[in-house]
Image (spheres, rainbow, N blue to C red):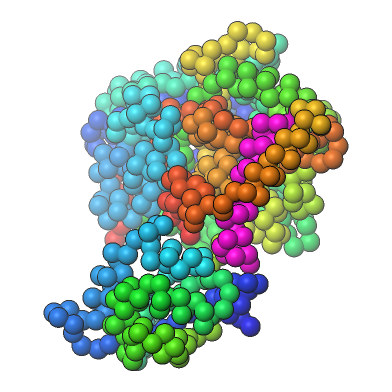
């Protein structure tokens, strides 16, 4: 597998665009024939994975829920060939994902409580003007074709500090370091972002971990719909709107930080595994290191093999849970089929530290993850590593920051004899993050979209 | 000694199931229905044989033919598979089964060829050992400590983590004094009953990936 046809793949599946503005148009399809016309029109505006000579001012990408594909009247044989978790949708998977209690669907935004979201039409843009222009063009196509109607436009926007877009999220952490490298993605393999080799180097993961139609890390084809041409170069996406209780988080960090001998910022770094400026705790456990943050050859280039007890980076830290690297031994082979590609942007107004802030205000992050198998990759990570701790020898403890604690959570931060780095336990954890909805989507290739638009999906 | 890991014994028994019917249904079906109704929580019969870590009973029908190029093959009989990971000695464990859960053992193994009953525990032990095969894998979550040691360790772990959470940051002398009280309390505490540490339902119970 040397190269893939990047002009056939939606750009969103291959790269994070790094634009500060986004609008996710959540659409309901009206009628199969009109919806086909709508898709046929939209295809020409879609952003592919083609390498940019000049960065565009905006991008367009599209994905469908299972209900959307049903509405498009794809053949039954094709529909039933999709993986069952995609057919069921994210809401039906709530027990498996531990989306219960405060994260249960009854607390979701109304648009996600019903089955009308058929399409995710995403626009990323460099400016608000470009965002508005592109969206009105798309809305015009919806109107002209009569194929879809807008249920909700979810805006997202980078956190601006001193007038400049940053990669910070509302809790104050610098986010979005690295994503798994995979073969054929036309990207240099960055140390720390693919998989570990036996001699401790990094190399790209198998294409089939992130795109359908290619061999995955086990040399198998991930479960995919038929015909093959509908699946190939497509992938699955999870969309989760995660509300952030910023007031609760800041108060908690203030209180616990005053009890923790290493101080508030060091404790904050133990929660995530990165200091709030992004410095990896594993590489720099005692202080922020701006030079390290800027260096893309170093800021994701670390392993946990020499820190199995979590004395530097706690074993339950957020980034260590999401990607344990070599923490389970076997040169990291146990994580190679559990990787997800992350996308997303914050939504809502950012409030600088020290200013009054309320939990109730609408702010959080639109989290999206791409993978070939929602079941094997996203759902496994969410269930076993985020909402549970057994693989990490942390019992029932969940991820401190995004876990669904319900007021009863506990987190252990390992420590040493150093009085500034003692072991520390946080108990009675509330939910710092609450789920407000989302679903599972299929992000087809350009070829597949043409097939859908022309009613030519033929499973025989 | 593949059957032994530390203080833990891994038992695997294959008992041929009787041919023919019992009442209206065949023995294998009757056995499968009976097994389906056995409680799996702390009221399970194996909870009474308190040295049991995990036990499993399965009716094995035949080799499943998966199509060419595989060859179609068949077992000589249907089998009851009994697997148990427990503390200590095999003879003692089987004797305990015969003495402590005789009705259960009868209800299960009455469907098997050559079952002598439990009235004579020695005969039952001899029968079970005749059906034994070597165990090469233990249940993944079983370590090499006894049930009692595990329960006690969980109790201590839970108590210590609560202790740290309540006392972290206090002056050393106060912590030391409080720790003395904790040690005393733990020394006197009864080990919790099996399943008594955290019976709360967790996401883990719905693990589809294992």
Work out whether A456 lies above or below A268.
Answer: below
Number of on-image labels: 0
The residue furthest left is B24
Closest to the observer: B43 or A358? B43
**Residue A335 visible somewhere in the drawing:** no
Q: Residue at x 56, y 30 (%)?
A: A428
| Residue B40 visible here | yes
Could you tell me which quadrant the C terminus of chain A lies in?
bottom left
Q: Position of residue A33 (x, y in %)?
A: 24, 36
**Residue placed at 43% from the left, 45% from the top?**
B201
Side of B208 where A354 appears, left or right: right
> Horizontal and vertical percent for residue A213?
48, 56
Give, as a single range, the part of the protein colored magenta. B142-169
**Residue at position x 46%, y 35% in the image:** A239
A154 lies left or right of B135: left
In the image, residue A239 above or below residue A162: below
Residue B163, image x, y percentages: 67, 37
**A274, B126: nearer the viewer:** B126
Instruction: Determine which quarter of the picture holds residue A411.
Output: top right
Question: A329 or B206: nearer the eye?
Answer: B206
- The residue under the point 40% across, 43% down is A95
Q: Along the horizontal axis of the image, is A302 left or right of A389?
A: right
The quadrant of the picture occupied by the N terminus of chain A is bottom right
Q: Position of residue A88 (x, y in %)?
A: 33, 45
Viewer-side residue, B88 vs B36: B88
**Overall secondary structure of the magenta stretch?**
helix
- Is residue B167 found inside the magenta-colored segment of the image? yes
Q: Report whether A221 appears left or right of A35.
A: right
Determine if the magenta segment contains residue B52. Answer: no
């Amino acid at each position: 597998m040397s190269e893939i046809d990047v002009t056939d793949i939606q750009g969103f599946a291959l790269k994070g665009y790094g634009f500060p503005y986004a609008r996710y148009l959540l659409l309901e399809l009206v009628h199969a024939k009109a919806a086909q016309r709508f898709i046929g029109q939209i295809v020409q505006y879609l952003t592919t994975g083609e390498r940019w000579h000049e960065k565009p001012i905006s991008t367009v990408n599209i994905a469908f829920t299972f209900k959307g594909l049903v509405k498009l009247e794809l053949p039954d044989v094709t529909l039933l060939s999709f993986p069952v978790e995609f057919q069921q949708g994210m809401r039906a998977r709530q027990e498996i994902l531990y989306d219960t209690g405060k994260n249960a669907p009854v607390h979701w935004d109304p648009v996600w409580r019903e089955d009308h979201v058929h399409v995710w039409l995403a626009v990323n843009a460099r400016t608000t003007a470009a965002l508005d222009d592109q969206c009105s063009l798309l809305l015009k196509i919806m109107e002209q074709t009569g194929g879809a109607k807008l249920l909700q436009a979810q805006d997202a926007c980078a956190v601006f500090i001193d007038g400049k877009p940053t990669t910070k999220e509302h809790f104050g952490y610098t986010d979005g370091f690295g994503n798994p490298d995979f073969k054929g993605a036309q990207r240099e393999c960055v140390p720390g972002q693919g998989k570990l080799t036996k001699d401790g180097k990094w190399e790209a993961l198998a294409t089939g971990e992130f795109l359908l139609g290619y061999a995955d890390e086990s040399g198998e084809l991930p479960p995919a719909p038929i015909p093959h041409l509908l699946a190939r170069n497509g992938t699955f996406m999870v969309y989760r709107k995660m509300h952030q209780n910023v007031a609760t988080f800041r108060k908690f960090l203030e209180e616990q930080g005053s009890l923790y001998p290493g101080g508030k910022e060091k404790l904050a770094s133990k929660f995530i595994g990165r200091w709030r400026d992004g410095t990896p705790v594993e590489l720099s456990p005692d202080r922020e290191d701006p030079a390290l943050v800027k260096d893309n050859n170093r800021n994701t280039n670390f392993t946990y093999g020499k820190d199995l007890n979590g004395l530097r980076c706690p074993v339950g830290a957020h980034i260590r849970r999401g990607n344990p690297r070599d923490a389970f031994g076997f040169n990291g082979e146990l994580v190679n089929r559990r990787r997800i590609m992350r996308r997303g942007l914050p939504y809502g107004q950012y409030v600088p530290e020290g200013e009054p802030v309320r939990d109730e205000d609408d702010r959080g992050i639109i989290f999206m993850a791409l993978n070939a198998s929602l079941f094997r990759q996203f759902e496994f990570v969410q269930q076993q590593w985020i909402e549970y701790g057994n693989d990490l020898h942390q019992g029932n403890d969940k991820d401190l920051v995004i876990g669904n604690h319900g007021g009863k959570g506990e987190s252990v931060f390992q420590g040493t004899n150093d009085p500034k780095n003692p072991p520390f336990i946080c108990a009675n954890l509330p939910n710092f993050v609450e789920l407000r909805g989302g679903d599972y989507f299929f992000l087809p290739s350009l070829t597949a979209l043409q097939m859908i638009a022309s009613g030519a999906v033929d499973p025989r | 000694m593949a059957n032994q890991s530390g203080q833990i014994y891994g038992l695997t028994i294959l008992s041929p199931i009787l041919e023919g019917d019992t009442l209206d249904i065949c023995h294998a079906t009757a056995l499968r229905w009976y097994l389906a109704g056995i409680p799996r929580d702390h009221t399970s019969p194996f909870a009474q044989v308190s040295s049991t870590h995990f036990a499993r009973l399965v009716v094995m029908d035949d080799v499943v033919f998966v199509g060419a190029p595989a060859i179609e093959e068949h077992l000589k009989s249907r089998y009851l598979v009994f697997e148990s990971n427990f503390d200590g000695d095999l003879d003692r464990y089987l004797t305990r089964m015969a003495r402590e859960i005789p009705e259960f053992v009868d209800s299960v193994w009455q469907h098997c060829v050559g079952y002598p009953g439990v009235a004579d525990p020695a005969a039952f032990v001899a029968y079970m050992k005749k059906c034994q095969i070597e165990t090469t894998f233990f249940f993944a979550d079983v370590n090499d400590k006894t049930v009692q040691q595990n329960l006690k360790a969980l109790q201590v772990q839970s108590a210590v983590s609560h202790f740290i959470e309540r006392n972290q940051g206090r002056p050393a002398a106060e912590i030391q004094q409080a720790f003395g009280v904790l040690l005393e309390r733990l020394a006197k505490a009864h080990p919790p009953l099996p399943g008594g540490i955290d019976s709360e339902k967790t996401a883990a119970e719905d693990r589809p990936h294992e």
